[in-house]
Image (cartoon, helix red, strand yellow):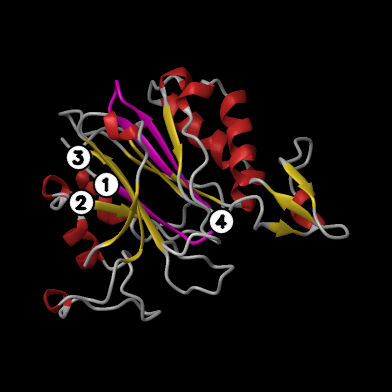
Amino acid sequence: MLFHEFRSSRLSGVPRLFHVVYGKPLGPPEPSDASIERNPSGNADARNEAAARRAFPSHWRNLPVARVSQVHGTELTILPCAEDGAADSTVVPAANDREADGLVAEGPGALLRIVVADCMPVFLVDPARRRSALVHAGWRGLAAGIIERSLQALAAGGTVASDLLVWIGPHIGPDAYEVGPEVIGAFPGRPPVSRPGRGDRAFLDLYETARTSLLAAGVPDRSIEERPACTRSDDRLFSHRAGDTGRNVAFLGFAA
């Protein structure tokens, strides 16, 4: 099964790095996909590992995949390095049941995976040290500081913010994301980027809010990819607000 694929032009130039957001299937299942089980929601989206692996480039099909149970918080799961400097694949299965909203690989050899519908998948890549982080960031995570925590986790392993390349993948855009005052008020002392909506509501700009945090932490503006597609308006992508039960799936990792 093939899916609509979304990638960063900047990250595409990093050697031995795989990154992608898989959206909706390109079409109905092919005869060769008959054995692929559907997810509990009934969707053959890329949460199904068999379907996702068939869509991977061949070089990455056998890498272990680390996934977590996402809870809209700020916890991170760290994949430490083994003696050879690669991410320790023995800890990957242990990561799969943890409640967290981000994963950090301290070396190559494993793929990180998160699922999103309207929230942001944030790709953080240190090309020189072959370290990476993949973060699920909605308004709750942003308000609680998941961007800052991810940068701190990378810094603890020697990554300098100015060396990072960042891609914020497809998510709901500011023209489609109207929220109540309780959301805006969840950002104490550092209001998010927004514009007035109807009554006391506002249109929240997740991308610019995250970008502001990245710049404040020392990530250069030139290293942050431009605004991506909007999940609510692009029918190649799943959107929770549109009523979709499927999910877009993001993968990131260096080959050993």
Residue matched to label 3: 109
Q: Amino acid at mark 2?
A: Pro
Q: CA distance from mark 3 to mark 2?
A: 8 Å
Q: Is residue 59 left or right of residue 195?
A: left
Residue matched to label 1: 111
Q: Is residue 113 left or right of residue 222?
A: left
**Residue 132 sits in quarter:** top left
Q: Quadrant of the C terminus?
A: top left
- Viewer-proximal residue, 23 or 183? 23
Badge 2 vs badge 1, beta-carbon distance below 8 Å:
yes
Q: Position of residue 146 (x, y in %)?
A: 56, 42
Q: Is residue 173 above or below residue 107?
A: below
Q: Amino acid at mark 1?
A: Leu
Badge 4 vs badge 2, beta-carbon distance below 8 Å:
no
* x 35%, y 35%: residue: 9
Badge 4 vs badge 1, beta-carbon distance below 8 Å:
no
* x 33%, y 69%: residue: 45
Q: Which mark is residue 72?
A: 4
Q: Amino acid at mark 3?
A: Gly
Q: How many marks?
A: 4
Badge 3 vs badge 2, beta-carbon distance below 8 Å:
yes
- Viewer-proximal residue, 26 or 202? 26
Q: Position of residue 64 (x, y in %)?
A: 20, 51
The magenta stretch spans which residues? 112-134
